[in-house]
Image (cartoon, rainbow, N blue to C red):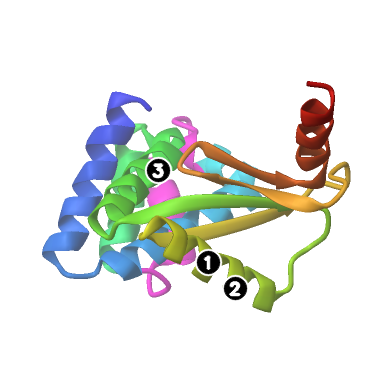
């Protein structure tokens, strides 16, 4: 993470905390991040110094004002004005890191052989929260190469409940 990401992400976190709008700002930063990911040309436009700043700031107003808290739209404008808009993702990461720390949220990534239903996701999230004693922010993905079961990574630590690993463990025990 760059110093810019740390500084500006920390600043928007402190502002949102002071204004008691942490949840709203978190959602808005996520929304803006999706827009930038889905529309890379828009990000290129905002980052192009050859385009007049008024035009770039106007585009932000059209895209975000009224849809996100004013402080988030102003934050994006500030990043454009300073020439730091390409650091937006790092700023959001720093904000989320501080947010998750404040609310004791652990990030969990579950990988399974098939897409989990909403009910299965809810049950897994609840089970993980009980297991580690923290709130969980769960993301899921599919890996067709898994034989069965799933793997879960929580804050970087891997919990491997895949069938392949269990079979390997059994084979290892049998060959001892």
Please report the residue visible at 58 percent of the width from the left and 74 percent of the height from the top. 122
Give the numbered dot on residue 93.
Answer: 3
Q: Is residue 47 highlighted in magenta?
A: yes
7 relative position to 158: left or right: left
SS class of the residue under badge 1?
Answer: helix
Distance between the Cα atoms at labels 3 and 2? Answer: 27 Å
Mark 3 neighbour density, 10 Å: few (under 14) some (14–19) many (20 or more): some
User: For this rendering, which residue is in front, 123 or 41?
Assistant: 123
Could you say where residue 36 lies in the image, as x and y percent from the top left?
56, 49
Q: Residue at the far bottom: name it.
A: 119
Q: Nearer the viewer, residue 149 or 58?
A: 149
Picture coordinates of residue 99 (x, y %)? 29, 54
Q: Residues within 10 Å of mark 2 (few under 14, many from 20)?
A: few
- Where residue 10 appears, x then y in whole percent? 23, 43
Outermost residue on the top side: it is: 176
Nearer the observer: mark 3 or 2; the answer is: 2
Identify residue for label 2.
123
CA–CA distance in space, label 1 to label 2: 6 Å
First to last magenta residue range:
46-68
Note whether 44 is above or below 3 in the view shown. Answer: below
Residue 127 marker? 1
């Amino acid at each position: 993470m760059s110093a810019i990401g740390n500084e500006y992400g920390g600043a928007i976190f402190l502002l949102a905390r002071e204004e008691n709008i942490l949840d709203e700002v978190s959602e808005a930063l996520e929304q803006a991040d999706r827009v930038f990911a889905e529309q890379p040309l828009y990000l290129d436009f905002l980052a192009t110094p050859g385009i007049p700043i008024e035009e770039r700031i106007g585009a932000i107003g059209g895209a975000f004002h009224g849809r996100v808290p004013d402080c988030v739209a102003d934050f994006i404008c500030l990043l454009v004005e300073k020439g730091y808009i390409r650091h937006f993702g790092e700023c959001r990461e720093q904000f989320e890191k501080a947010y998750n720390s404040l609310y004791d949220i652990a990030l969990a990534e579950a990988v399974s052989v098939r897409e989990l239903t909403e009910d299965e996701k809810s049950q897994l999230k609840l089970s993980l929260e009980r297991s580690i004693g923290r709130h969980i922010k769960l993301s899921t993905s599919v890996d067709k190469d898994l034989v069965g079961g799933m793997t879960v990574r929580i804050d970087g630590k891997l919990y491997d409940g895949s069938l392949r690993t269990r079979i390997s463990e059994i084979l290892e025990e049998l060959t001892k």
